[in-house]
Every structure is written in C-alpha cells, then in structure tokens.
Image (cartoon, rainbow, N blue to C red):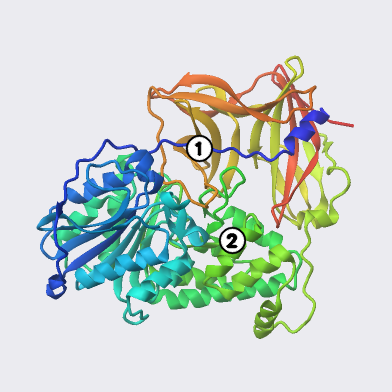
Amino acid sequence: MKKILNVLVLALVCASLLTGCFVEEVELSAERAETPQGEMAYLEDSWSIYWYHCGSDLESNWGCASGDLKEMLDVELPENVRVVVQTGGAKTWHNTQVDADKLQRYLYSSDGFYLVDEQPKGNMGSPDTLADFLKFCTAHYPAAHTMVVFWDHGGGSVGGAAYDENYRYDSLKLNEFYQAFQSAFELSVDNPPVDVVGFDTCLMATIDTAYTFCDIARYLVASEESEPGCGWYYTGWLKALSENPGMDGAELGRVICDSFAEGCEKEEVADEITLSVTDLSRIGDLMEAYENLGKEALLNAVDNPGFFPALGRMASRAENYGGNTEDAGYTNMVDLGDLARHCKDLLPESSGAVQAGLENCVVYKINGPYRTEATGLSCYYSYNSDKKDYSGYADIAACDAFTYLYAYEIDGSLDENGMQYLNGIGFDREELAEVHTLSDVSPEQDYPVYVDDEGNAVMDIGPEIANLLKGVYFRLVYVDEEQDMALLLGRDNNIYMDWENGVFRDNFHGTWGAIDGNLVYMELIYEGSDYNTYMLPILLNGEKYNLRVVYDYNDAQYYILGARKGLDANGMADKNLLQLQPGDEITTLHYVATMSGEDAFELYEMDRFTVTENTSFEEIDMGDGEFAMMFELVDVRNQTTWSEMALFTVEDGVIHTETLD
C-alpha cells in the first residue's frame, strides 16, 4: 500500500496533440496590382479593415486561416468597404495563392482580390513587422473608419497573440502591440485613431489588453476564453457591414459577436464561448476601481496572514479560462467581475465598483451555457505562483497594486518600489505580515485520517492549517493486488468541507466517471457554483487529446463538450475544439503502476471503443474491489501536501473504510 502513496504524489503531466478544423485546399486567385493610393478616405461611411493574418500551425496543420479567407471572399463588398490582409507566420498555406516564404499583402474590395505588395519573409511576432504593416495600410488605404483584426492563437495578458510558427512561435506581447501602434499612429485617449481592434484569438479580452489599447481604439472585441477553431464568422459580419457601412464600432462589434455565436452553434462548439465588446472610452472608471481593488487587497495582505489563502479560495471558485492546472497549463486568467463578486465580503470597499465599472464599459457580450459568469474582461491572478510567468505579467500589467500584491505573495517581501507604493497608500509600518505556507507547518508525516462512526474517512487539520489553504481535493486509485496493479482514477473535489473548523470527509460511493461504460481518468479543471469542468486524456482515432466534460449541477448530468489541447511551452492556447463524431475510435488512457515494483505511474492504453450517436458520459458503479484515497492540500503558492491514505473495500455493494496503521 505504501506504493500507492509514492505514486499518488507524482506530478501528472500529459501532453496532447490535436488535428483541428481541417479544410480542403482553398482555391484563391489574386491578380497582381499596383498599390492604389488613399482615395477612399474621402468616401462617406468608408471602412478599411486591416487584417493581420498570422497563420501559424492553425494554417499549416489544419487550413483554418485559408478557410477564413474564403469566408471573406464569399462577401461582395461595396466601394466604401475594403479589407487589407497581410499573410505570414505559417510554414505552409492550404490555398493556391499565398506564398509561405514571403510576407504578402492583399487587397479585397469591390474591384476584386489583388496581391498589392510582397515583403521578404519576416516574424509576425515582431512589433517591427506589425508597425510596417500598419504604416503601409494607413499610407495607401485610409478610410473614415478603420478596424484592425488580429488572427491566430492567443495567450492572455502575458502570452499576447500572433505566434509565428517560423520563428519559434514568437508572439506579440501587449507592450509590443503598443510599440507598433505608437510608431504608426498619433495616439489619443480622446480621439483614438482606430475605431475597433479585434482579436480573433484565444484569451485576449483582458483588462490589461483594454488598458493597452485605450488610446489606440474606441472599441475592443475579444474573447476571455479559448475560441473554437471556427473562430469569427467573416462572411456574417462582413456581409452585415457591407449592407450597412454606416454602423459605428459598437454596432459592428455586436454583429461580430452574434455571427460568431451563430457560427459556433452551427458547428456545435458553442458551450464555452465568450466574446465581448468593450467601449475603451469608458475604461477610466474601471481602471480606477481595479486599482482600488488591488490597493484594498494589498493592504489586507500585508496586515493579515490569512488573506492570501482566502483570496485563493475565491479565485478557484471564480470563472477562469484556458485551463489553470498542471495538465492543462496555466494562463492565470480569471474573470474580473466574477472574482470581484466572490470577493464582496473579503474586499467590501472596492469590489462593487469593479462590477459597476465592467457593466458600464462592456457594452455587449455573448456567453456559452458553460461560461455564464463571464463579465467581458478577465484579469491576471497567479494561480501557479510561477516567478517567470509573474515576471511577464509585471512587464505589461495595467495595475501597480496587483503587480506588488503578487510579488509579495510569491516572494513574501516587497522591493523598494513596492514599499514606497505601499507607504503611499497608507501603510505606515516597516514590518509586513509573514506569508505562511504549508512548508512552514507541515509535519514530518502526512496529515492523519481516521474513520468516523458513519464509516467516513475524515481529515481534521483544524482551522489554523485550513486557513493556509486555497483548496482541498482528493486522488482516487483502484487497487488490484492479484494483478499487481494500481490504477489512478483521477482528482476531484467531491468531498464534504468544513473550512471554519478544518474538517474534511470523503463522499465515496463506489462510482466514477465513464464514457459508454468505460472507466476514465478524469481531473477537475474548474469548480464553479453551477458546473464543474473535467479533463480526460484519451486517444481519438489514434491521436492524443484532452476531452472536456462538464457536470451540470442544475440537471445533475454530465455533458461532453469536445476535445482540445492545453497551453504549449510558449503559453499559446489551442484554438481548436473538436466534437466527437459517430465512427470515431476512442482509447481510454490511465496512469498505471505495479504494486510490487519501484516503477512510477505511466500512461497506458486501456479500453477501445467506437463513438455512436448515443455516446455519453456518466458515473457508473465500479463494482466490488479495493480503492485508495488521499486528501490533497494546496496552499497559496500552489504547493501540495498529502493526507494519510484511506482504504475502501467494496463487497456486494457495501463499503468498508479503514486507514493504514
């Protein structure tokens, strides 16, 4: 049994591959034309769309960028609407026109589709490349109204967007976006040069993005969550703009949101979508409220050792995006409004103003049924306490208070600038409260577990230890001594929690999740008030995926959302969500180790079956057998400590619980 203990504490990292939204090779034909000058700038209600089309592996692997070019060409444009496209960033393109060895610029207008300029191959993740494109567009294709669209992967506030596959997936960070626009435009908060900036990417609807672009554009259109591979529906919103070029940026943003939702519903990938329109001229009040939220949090933290764990518990319950687990990767993006709502008692002076500020500046949004708490903009929260990731945030952060808050949480101290800031907001002492973690109080052995009178496994750590934690979970293992096998079933939070007294007890019923009756490894990746989201490693038609499954508390059922991969090493979020189709072959993957040997858990293929129209996910009775469980304690710095092991023996449906002496 000690073998199970050793195996349970291993880090479980599961990489996944995804084939995505592949389209057949697209027939594109562009005539070569001289670059026309800016005569359209004087047409009434004229629009120029500047489309920075970084294909990346979304194009080279699946042809998604070519598919959206085709969607654009399905619209007949009027004379006062035109689109300027720069292509690059992909090793290959799935169409008959674009040359992957060059940066090419195309004009689509009422006269047709033209290749108007070519540049040597360059890095689409470089601010100089973006600046050169913007200068080209404004010099040759000005208009009464302009929109700049970024197409590719996105990585949230830290990762940025436009990951160039040819240059080690280098991306444009928020400060680099600003650098490029500053070199191409005269920026002004009162009179920004661009009507709309749009991100047809994942995770870029953040308060840091909004602040970066507040003197560049009037409106921001972006998604808090990872987008499905179909992305924006270009035929839909370009057709609407062509029929009504008199619309303003807010109305255009609404059309983009609605057509995006319609396209995702058609592809059956709308369950977790988000897209919002933010009026950046109204961002001032929100920024002030956000800074005040950070100030209140910082003043609480330096005075109260229990503040950070309490904030962590609120952040774990708030809607967050892109994963935020070891297996899925950490974007560290959480919905700003939902975080403020959960913190109304913890931060009573400022949380309400943040919610009001969001309602004022987010003028339109769409939410899938399993992203109901999205308020339009996310913010950074250091879920993983990673210093490198935090350093990237500090470089672009829109809020000084939160920058110092996370520095203090991670390091337990503040530098000279941080102390000056803290003194400036009313802190008049030299000593800061110590940031306590489990490493300060953990015993030499694991936390004890006992069996109560009702046969439940109970961990009683008391309020002092509980106040150091941001989360308590459990890991479950199936044990087969005859087969010399320990099979790890997964991680969940389905336990009874008494945080006030620090008492936690199991809720084991001998059931676990399964697809069509086949047991799976499942890991909790989001715990909400209305639903939980789980990730399951599988092989789908021989390729490794993470299947996403949601448990809906409202109707007490599980639903399969689709398959996608987590963040890659560059912080790049996957923009593909695949639906299971009848005829697909699934192979379940489990972490398995021997009971007798010294081998670690390894991922093995288990059950193989074919998807049908009736394929579903549900909890099933696992029958008689032996199971082992450990409580997992997680502190504010994402460090983990374990409890002793509880053993469940199921015989004829009766569960007997014991602990190891």
Q: Position of residue 627 (x, y in %)?
A: 73, 26
Whether residue 329 is situated above or below residue 86 in the rendered picture? above
User: Which quadrant of the figure has residue 400?
Assistant: bottom right
- Give the image quarter of residue 465: bottom right
Q: Position of residue 301 (x, y in %)?
A: 70, 70
Residue 549 badge: 1
Which of the image's four quarters has the C terminus?
Answer: top right
* Residue 105 x, y percent position in the rendering: 25, 58
The amino acid sitting under disc 2 is Tyr
Q: Examine the rendered structure and indicate whether residue 235 appears above or below residue 661.
A: below
Identify which residue, 67 or 123, lies in the foreground: 123
The structure residue drawn at horizontal position 34% and vertical position 49%, both measured from the top left corner, is 231
Work out whether residue 360 can be spotted. no
Mark 1 residue element: strand
Instruction: Characterize the local packing of mark 1: few (<14), some (14-19) or many (20 or more) Cα atoms within 10 angstroms.
Output: many
User: Residue 511 at what x, y percent from top left?
Assistant: 63, 28
The earlier-in-sequence mark between 2 and 1 is: 2
Q: CA distance from mark 2 to mark 1?
A: 24 Å
Give residue 521's quadrant in the image: top right
Tally of numbered discs: 2
Please name which of the two marks, 2 or 1, marks the residue nearer to the observer.
2
Question: For the point 30% across and 76% down, which residue is it?
Answer: 193
Q: Amino acid at mark 1?
A: Val
Q: Is residue 27 left or right of residue 180?
A: left
Is residue 394 toward the left or the right of residue 124 in the image? Answer: right
Specify the quadrant that holds the N terminus. top right
Whether residue 585 can be seen here: yes
Residue located 65% across and 69% down the image: 405
Classed neighbour count for the residue bearing mark 2: other residues with Cα under 10 Å, few (<14), some (14–19), many (≥20): many
User: Would you name the residue on which mark 2 appears?
Assistant: 381
Would residue 418 appear left or right of 254 to someone viewing this image?
Answer: right
* Residue at the limit of the structure toward the front, as seen here: 120
